[in-house]
Image (spheres, rainbow, N blue to C red):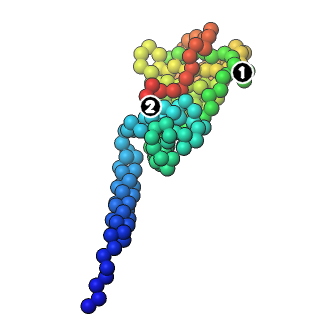
Amino acid sequence: MHLRKFNPLKVTNALFVLALNKQILHDCSMSVENSSKAPDAFDLAILRLLQHDCTQPHRKIGEAVNLSTASVQRRIKRMEKAGIIAAQTAQIDPKKVGLPLTIVVEVELRSETAGRIDDIKRSFLDAPEVQQCYYVTGVVDFVLIVIVGDMSEYEDLTQRLFFPNDNIRKFHTFVAMDRTKATTRLNL
């Protein structure tokens, strides 16, 4: 009978490989599991950094939140897939590109049937001057944030969007005198 000599290094390596495989399986199951869960503390820290500058390298984010680059990449990909990260865009100063006029518009409808509301939402979505659109409760039905170059551009928009639509009872226009704060950053 031939007995092999006991080699503790081989046993240690085998245990390490088993532990590593178990950890990889655990990480994979956690990533599937976490895709539907609320963001954890690491996710929120990553989101705060991305809101400040979404162009910074994942390595730098990882250093800031004490995670590996690969872990940061997986978390960002998971949050994109879950719709938590809706887009990564540049915030542009409208005045510096010839669009200095911000207008808040309250819109009141005649009929609030589902089909009519969907139609008006579509028309607001299709108008590039409408930067934000909120379907709200209260006296008015919609609040719009419109950005244009001047009042004649706004007048053209009203002629296209409001006056021809028989479902718009009335609209109120508020011209912003100063753009005191405009951000997309959330308080995470």
Measured as percent of width and height from the top left, residue 114 is found at 44, 31
Say whether marks 2 and 1 touch (CB < 8 Å): no
- Would residue 96 appear left or right of 15 to someone viewing this image? right
Q: Quadrant of the C terminus?
A: top left
Q: Earlier in the sequence, mark 2 or mark 1?
A: 1
Viewer-nearest residue: 30 or 96: 30
Query: Quick one: which residue is furthest to the bottom in this view?
Result: 1
At numbered mark 2, what does the secondary structure look like: helix, strand or loop? helix
- The amino acid at mark 2 is Ala
Q: Which quadrant would residue 25 be assigned to in this image?
A: bottom left
Viewer-nearest residue: 26 or 101: 26
Measured as percent of width and height from the top left, residue 146 is found at 61, 20
Q: Which residue is mark 1?
A: 96
Q: Which quadrant would residue 56 be assigned to in this image?
A: top right
Q: Nearer the viewer, mark 2 or mark 1?
A: 1
Q: Which residue is mark 2?
A: 114
The answer to whether residue 54 is above or below residue 92 is: below
The reply to whether residue 143 is in sight is yes
The answer to whether residue 115 is above or below residue 36 is: above
At numbered mark 1, what does the secondary structure look like: helix, strand or loop? helix
Q: Residue at x 62, y 10 (%)?
A: 178
